[in-house]
Image (spheres, helix red, strand yellow):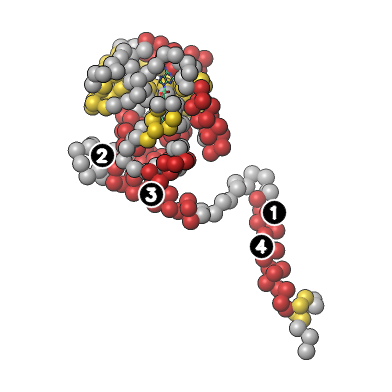
Amino acid sequence: MKREWGPGIPKPLIPFIAIVLVILTAVAVRQIPGMPEARAETGEDAMYRVLRERMVKNQISHPPDYRDPVKAPEVLDAMSSVPRHLFVDPRDVSRAYSDYPLPIGYGQTISQPYIVALMTEMLKVGAQHRVLEVGTGSGYQAAVFSHMAEKVFSVEIVAALGRRAATRMKDLGYANVRVRVADGYYGWEEHAPFDRIIVTCAASLVPPPLLKQLKPGGKMCIPVGGLYAVQYLTLIEKSIKGDITMRKLLPVRFVPLTRALR
Ligand code: SAH
């Protein structure tokens, strides 16, 4: 007996034809305009997602030690989403979700996850906010803000780091983040005023241009302290009338704010 099915297709070919049809359908579906590219989670993605969930629980929302937990759901969601392993040096990927800062080249570091979460929570960022960051570094903090704010403007003084972060933002689809290579001491006048300002390098004094570019009702978070002195994470608030209040919150260690373009 001849092994045929329906319109004369040999039976052994049926699984092969089925696979070709599935592939063609997948290609066609992805080409429908407006349809987001559906990308299934790979085993590797799933592994990093589990590491991120552990990082958020064990270091941020339920830390076992003296730290105050960070509880704001929008901060925890953003920290659970941003693929931190894509912001570190390739040789540090296995340590990307560990409880410490990591080197990113040029003597700079990506901050410890808990500190990123804490500063983000302190600023109470809203969906309509325009945020200025001084010290783009890897772009990780900017990516976290990107989930919560309308727009993020980030300034980096080391040209190679700024360029690398800008490319990373583009590749990872963080479309509401803009990166500029410049001395962030001067803020980013063209896009001022800002609802929120974060400085991720330590200044011995709060740069006056940043105070000026903060909107009335706005908040700024900045580590303040000299190179060899204790630095304090400081929360600055500008009232609607323009009065400034400053609160020293906790001792921290950040790389210094420098003034020369490199
Ligand atoms: N927010 C970063 C961590 C940055 S480390 C992240 O998420 O990865 C601090 C960064 O501030 C460094 O990259 C350093 O080069 C940068 N920096 C130092 N002085 C600066 C200045 N005057 N203007 C802009 N960036 C500065």
Mark earlier in primary sequence (1, 4): 4
Three-letter residue code for mark 1: Ala
Which callout, 3 or 4, points at the residue further toward the start of the chain? Answer: 4
Comes first in the chain, label 1 or label 3: 1
Residue 92 spot, x, y in % from top left: 42, 41
- The quarter of the rendering in which ligand 1 is drawn is top left
Q: Which residue is mark 2?
A: 69
Residue occupying image coordinates x 70% and y 69%: 16
Q: Amino acid at mark 2?
A: Pro
Image height check: is 129 above or below 41?
Answer: above
Viewer-side label of 3, 4: 3
Mark pair 1, 4: CA separation:
10 Å
Front tag of 2 and 3: 3
Kind of residue sitting beneath label 4: Val
Of mark 4 and mark 2, the one earlier in the sequence is 4
Q: Is residue 138 left or right of residue 101?
A: right
Closer to the camera in the image, 141 or 86 = 86
Q: CA distance from mark 4 to mark 2?
A: 47 Å
Q: Which residue is mark 4?
A: 22
Q: Residue tagged by mark 3?
A: 51
